[in-house]
Structures are given as C-alpha cells and as structure tokens.
Image (cartoon, rainbow, N blue to C red):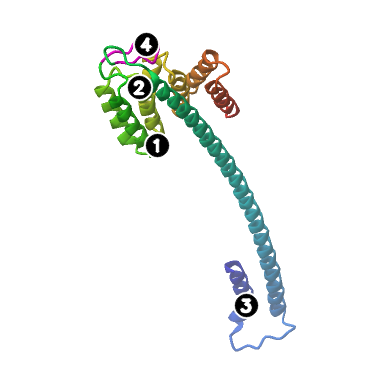
Amino acid sequence: MKVRTCILLAAGLPALLAGCSTTVRPDDPVYIRQQQLEARVDRLDQVFNNQSLVNLSQNLDNLQGQVNELRGDVQVLQHDQQLTKKQQRDLYSDLDKRLQKLELRMNSVTPSASGAGSMTTAPVTGASAGTDGDQAAYQQNFNLLKQGRYEDAINGFTNFIQQFPQSPLVPNAEFWMGEAHYQMSDFQGALVNYRAVVQGYPNSGKAQDAMLKIGYSQYEMQQYKAARKTLTGVIKQYPGTNVANLAKQRLERMRKAGH
C-alpha cells in the first residue's frame, strides 16, 4: 500500500502544482496517466495478494506434513513404550513365579540341628537364615516395591541385608533393590545391585535376571558397546531361556536404531 500511495502521489504531483482549484478534464493527459497508473497498481496489488495466498497455502501444507510426521513419530514411541512395558510385566511375572517356587522350597526344608535350612548350592549358615523372621521382613519390603514405594523398598532391603546377612534371600533382596533404582531411572545405582548379584551370587536364581538388567541399564545410560557385550553374554550363558529371548529383542532394537 505504501508503494501505491507513492505512485499516486507522484502521478498527481503535476495537478497539484497546477493548482488545487483547477478542474481535471477526462481528456487531460495527466488525468489519463494517473488512471493508467492506478490500474497498474491495482493489478500489482492483486498479483501480490494472490501470490501471498499461494505462499500461505504452501506453508500450511508444509506445516500439515510436519504435523503428520510428528504424529507418526509419537505413534512409534507409544508402540515402543507399550512393548517395553509388556516385556517388563513378563519379566516381573517370571520373577514372581520363581520367587514363589523358592519360598515353597524354603517352607519344605527340614531345619538342621542348628536351626538353619539350606536352599542353594552355596552354604547357608547362621541362626537367622531361612527362618520365619527373614521371610516376613523380606516379604514386607517386597510389598513396598510392588506398591511403587521404591525409596522405602531400598531402605527396607538395605536393613534386611544388614539384619540377615546369611539369609538365602539376600540375592533376591539385592536384585529387587536394583529394580527399585531402575524404576526410578537411577541406572547407575541399579548397576551396583545387579552386579552384586552376578558377582556375589552367581548360582542364585536371580543371577541371569540381574545380568540381563545390567545390559538394560547400560542401554539406558547410552553405553551401547557395553550393553551389546552384556546382552550377547546373556544369550551365550543362558541359551533358550526367557532372559536370552529378551536380550535378543533388545539387541535387535539397538540394531534398528543404529546403536
């Protein structure tokens, strides 16, 4: 509009110089020239407006395309999240079943003369090992974990290990402490507990699960090379098991993501 105003002012300048009281005749060359300029300015305005609409339409199309692309990314992320949750539920279900079997076996053990029962290949000694006291304390802390009270569960399992250091449930307590850290996204803290199980209790039923979760934790910390090595070790050391299948799935996911 500023351009149009300038053109009209320039076109009408001779008429203004000739005097404002002068009547403009239709055949006046200046008047004719002014009308021509106005017509040209109108055409330019129309072209400009049409071009703006075209650009606006193109911008809207581009934005719509980006929105569609982002929606697709969100759907992929949601699918991955659901898959991860399912894998986590499957893992918990498998672990709970093992825990129930372990507790049934513990209840069926006949105490020795010292009052201690042995449930694993590692020797279990001490008056408190395998007693109702450690089972009750363990179950109480495990319930805190299931309720999502992760800090309380960590503190409870820490006290449990200090109170019942010879209990056959210590490896389980270490593992579930790692799970509590993992659920809080404290993957470095989780690694400490998982490694305590693998290194300190290699014959425990929790050793293979702890090794898998070491690989998971390394993955979450973007230590992809270490994660691949750990998960590959799970497959080789525990072939045909549920943890081996989960390790394969995570390695495939890493491969697709370029990790």
Circle 1 residue: 146
Q: Nearer the viewer, mark 1 or mark 3?
A: 1
Under mark 4, the amino acid is: Ala
Position of residue 250 in the picture relative to residue 133 (left or right): right
Decide which of 9, 228 is in the foreground and name it: 228
- For residue 14, which numbered disc appears in the image? 3
Say which mark, if any, is on residue 161.
none
108 with respect to 43 (left or right): left
Which amino acid type is shown beneath numbered disc 2? Leu
123 magenta-colored? yes
Comparing 196 with 53, the one in front is 196
- In the rendered structure, are the residues bearing label 2 and label 1 in contact, judged by CB atoms less than 8 Å apart? no
Give residue 242's position: percent from left, percent from top: 54, 23
Dot 4 corresponds to which residue? Answer: 122
C-beta proximity under 8 Å, tags 1 and 3? no
Q: Which residues are magenta?
A: 116-126
Q: Earlier in the sequence, mark 2 or mark 3?
A: 3
Element class at badge 2: loop
Crowding at dot 3, Cα within 10 Å, few <14 / some 14-19 / many 20+, comes out as: few
